[in-house]
Image (spheres, rainbow, N blue to C red):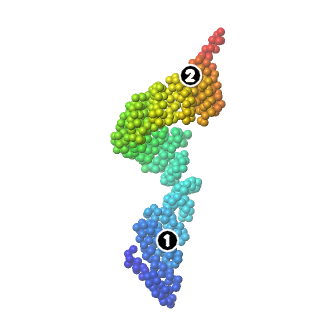
Amino acid sequence: MAASSVDARRCALTLALVLACASAGHGARVGPRVCTTTLPRTARVLAAVNAIPIIEEIVDLASNDYVNKAVRMLQAMEKQRTQLQGIPRKEAGRAYEAVWDASVRTSRYAITLNIYQRLQAEPGLIALDDAKIDTVLLACERQADGLLAERVMRESGESAERYNRVIRARTKQLEITDAVRLYRELQQRKWKLETGTINLMMQICFAIKQVDYSLKLFQAMDALGIAADERTFAIAIRSAAAGKGVKGPRSATEIGSGWVLALRLLNAMRSKEKAQGMPQVKGGPLVPSAYCFTAVIRSLCAAGEADKATSVLGQMVKAERAPDASLYAVVMRACALRGRYDDAMRLLEQMKAAGLAVDQSHIAALLLACERRGDGDARSALQVLQMMPDFGLQPTTLTFNMAMGSCAKRGDIEQAEQLLAQMDSAPEDARPNIVTLNTMLDTYKRADKWEACLEFLLKMESERQVQPDVVSVNTAIKACKDNGQFELALQLFEGMAGRGLEPDSVSFTEIIAACGRAGEWARAIAVFRAAEASADGVNTFVWNALVGAAVACDKSVEALETIKEMRSSGIAPDIVTFTTVMTMLSKKEEWEAVLFVAEELEATGLQLSRPLVNQVQRAGQALLGKERREASV
């Protein structure tokens, strides 16, 4: 407001003050801020005069959205009103109205609610019409004040829209029981939930890890006739993707969960026709957001569905929802886990074409694909390392180790030794570590070079000054065992304590198997008893090794007794246990024992593999032939 207008208002109030003093028969000296009269009425009028600049400044600040300053001045005005009670309600109301409007414009809903509480203490300060009540309910929703929202609705009148706001406020406050109560009231009045209300309830259920309830709300939308928008589908897709494994619908009225449902939801929101069991799509077919595509793709990758993930990624690109580099890394890793090196490389080329930066995670995915590809693809792994500088990257210890993993899988000693030599001369962040050296040991083992394996184990300590760990010694034990070097394997096992190492289940498994190959049943039993006394105890693998040792030592009775002892210890025999014994018994043509073991296997709930079924059939035919021969005699 202009200064002349303020002055005019002050002059008018000052004149009123003079007339009041004259009519009361008192003399008064009136100035801008000084009055010698002692009349309470005079003081109130003077307070009103002095408050005019404050009120005008509050209005000016609020109109320019300086809300915090306006609120501070409003508090100062309230303090003056409390002390002198001379500011007219109409003038104070103007200030409150201005700050109210500014708080709504700037979404400062906490201030809106504070003003509402003040208006409750002094009714009539400003008019609370339906529009302002709706604003209060909006503020309650944004501030998650469900209790106040419900009280305001009860006092000012109910409607479908107001019920929805109160339900959202209660839900945000995690007052789910009250939200459900209000929802039932809404149904009794035959009013509908809004899509936004369902969305919020689904989102809260997802946030508190109640994804099943989130999906049930989504499914209920179809029966309630509520259309789903893009946000609804986004929350439903994320809830479905959070489901563990693949869960199909348990009945015709259910839609299931997991990646299957996530993919169905993605297709449903793009379909021109309403999908069965799904709500109507609001506004017709929708183009899924990048968020929706990403959730589905990550769900597919987590389930190992690399082909489907790659297909959906292509759809995402076609829909112009640009995937980011991290999503490409996830899909490339899914391809890598299945040994799909060519697919992973194609995805890398797509990234380059899209102008996305390649980082170490993409290189790691390619190297993993090389390792998982057949018997290992050392050549491609080396090519990946060579292309890293093209992307501004340098090999690290991790990438070198992954490339060596491909060499180890093929038993390619020459390539592995070359990579190790490169690492020895590389910068600090690419130097060999214990994983590197263990991979080199594994390469010798897979190439059946047990002498080189033992020599490298000794060099780790003498030349590289690296203390071998349990994995190092286990690898050397296995190399000796696989090449018939039982005594050396036993020496390595017995020497673990001297290296400060505690044998683990792998150590015991390998040395028991070595004892079996050497026909040393008594030693196998002794090692097994040592395993029982160890800190980790024995597991299924150690038991199976003992069963295998009995088979290798041609002790069928002991093998069957071991299975019984295994079961009594609380560890259930697995398919490997039964296959080992049944194969031995079949070779010895002990057919009655074969059938006995088969019955034991079925009693555990395991399924007979095809080779085992053949062995059981042979046993049955052999016993039947034996009975016929005996009968003919």
- Residue located beneath label 1 in the image: 75
Q: Is residue 37 above or below residue 330?
A: below
Q: Position of residue 275 (x, y in %)?
A: 47, 43
Name which residue lies at 49% across and 70% down: 127
Residue at the outermost front position:
462
**Residue type at mark 2?**
Ala
* Quadrant of the snapshot with the N terminus: bottom left
Q: Is residue 22 above or below residue 322?
A: below
Name which residue lies at 54% across and 42% down: 253
Secondary structure type for disc 1: helix
Name which quarter of the figure residue 152 lies in. bottom right
Secondary structure type for disc 2: loop
**Mark seen at residue 308:** none
Residue nearer the viewer, 224 or 207: 207
Q: Position of residue 384 (x, y in %)?
A: 37, 36
Residue at the outermost top position:
633
Q: How many dots with numbers?
A: 2
Q: Position of residue 148 (x, y in %)?
A: 55, 62
**Mark seen at residue 518:** 2
Q: Position of residue 11 (x, y in %)?
A: 42, 82
**Residue type at mark 1?**
Gln
Question: How far is disc 2 from disc 1 in space, using C-alphas?
Answer: 93 Å
Q: Earlier in the sequence, mark 2 or mark 1?
A: 1
Name which residue lies at 41% across and 34% down: 420
Name which quarter of the figure residue 548 lies in. top right
